[in-house]
Amino acid sequence: MNRIKKEKSILGAINDLSHRLVLVLVFPIIISLVLMLFYAWEYHSAIRRMGEITELKAVVCEDIPEKAWNIVSGKNSFRQSDIYKVIHDVEDTIDKVTNETGEENRLSLIVAGRTMETLENYVDKIRDNISSEVPVVENEAVLAEVRNVSALVDSMLNEYIALEITSTAKMSRTLGLIIIITAVAEVLIVIIAILIRNVTMKKTAKMVRNPIEKLEEVTAVLADGTLDARITDTEVTELRNLTKQVNTMADRLENMMTQSDKDAKRLRKAELRTLQAQINPHFLYNTLDAIVWKAEGGETEEVIGLTSSLSDFFRISLSSGADWIPVSQERKHIEGYLKIQQTRYRDIMKYEIDIPEEIGNYYILKLLLQPLVENALYHGIKIKRGGGTIRVSGREENGYLLFSVKDTGCGMTPKQLEELNERIKKENPSVSEGGGGFGLVNVNMRIRLYYNEPEGLKITSGPDGTEVCFRVPCRTKEEIFEDESISG
């Protein structure tokens, strides 16, 4: 089963090429841009987090201890100092940055957050001491702890900033490496895109060139007269209609030539029928003269035999206009002809007919054997001193009927045989060419025309006489009618 070919368009092929090139060039760029934007965002986020933590350092190291001192010294109350709000703001910022930081750098912030809770506890203790009106000395000792805890938180924040700086440096190096790799990849991609473009353009050009070359080749063959040439179906959309139109034109030309050949064959068959009816009218005159001569001599049985043979001869010759008759009828036809001729050439002519009844029901073209017998009589037996014998035989072999008409007449010289063979090989031999043997030419043409055979008669001759042979396919009555109906 033939696979259905996918139709291709020249414009579609060009669009496919452009799409491939765009995909090859754009896809890596998109990937590199995404990576660069990701790392740029991470880098920006790290800088922002470090900025926020840096701002906390001053609050933790300076503002909170100072506010605690102002409270212990009595300069400000808790409400006035807003120390708790400052501590909570620091804790919220640390929690926020912690959540935004990766696992590898958040430990310092977690510790700093817990330390801020300790710092808040010391502030609570100062508040409780003031409420209990304990001596200032005790609050100063707590204030010292506040300062120590603030310094510890500051060190944790410094450690976090150092880790972030290290991570940011790694990201910077990674980003630089990505930029380098992207640049190299883009160069390689451009080279690959050029290669793809060249390969695809060659493929597209071949896709278009091959059908056009095939179109030129087939049209050249058609122009030379080979009308059975056809263009194979093309995959190219733009050339498909042209291909179909050329094939349609070739089909019409071939049909016209076939019809012309059929008309020519019909014309030639009609001409042959006309010529066939005009062959040797002297045979009828001579036979009638013989009948009259026999009647005057009182030879009644001879008259009856001659009249019967003549009747059979013409009845089979006419055959109600049919071109095909059974072999048995053809045998009867030549037998009647030979009986009539033997009346005239009793002293010089003998004949033998060996056509078995087994092949009698096959149909052949009528009047194939009689002209050969007539030729053997007039050009072989009659002109030989002492006369001779005519032997007519037929047999079936490998689906063919083989017939032979052999005489023991004077035969032909090699030159005469060559000239006769040249005559019968011609497509349109002329009656006026001379040299005799028109009956042979007629039979040869009819065999080639009606049986569509490349060769008709095969003639051999020598001092001992001449033999004319031919073979035709075995055909039944049904096959003949079927072929006639097809040929119209």
Image (tube, rainbow, N blue to C red):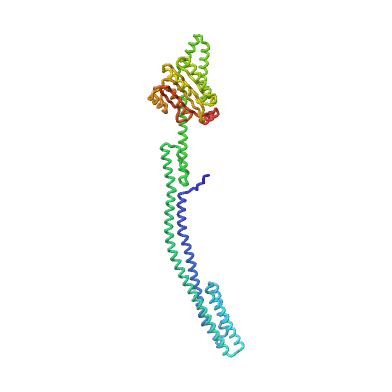
Residue 216 sits in which quadrant?
top left
Number of marks present in the image shown: 0
Residue furthest front as drawn: 464
Residue furthest right as drawn: 132
Can see residue 70?
no
Can see residue 234?
yes
Residue 16 pos. (x, y %): 47, 53
Residue 224 pos. (x, y %): 41, 37
Q: From this view, report whether residue 227 is shown above or below residue 105.
A: above
Residue 120 sits in which quadrant?
bottom right
Residue furthest top as drawn: 297
Residue located at (52% from left, 14% from top): 305
In the foreground, 387 or 447: 387
Residue furthest left as drawn: 415
Residue located at (47% from left, 37% from top): 251
Residue 351 pos. (x, y %): 48, 19
Residue located at (46% from left, 46% from top): 238
Residue 4 pos. (x, y %): 51, 46
Residue located at (42% from left, 49% from top): 205
Q: From this view, report whether residue 305 is shown above or below residue 92.
A: above
Q: From this view, report whether residue 96 is shown above or below residue 132.
A: above
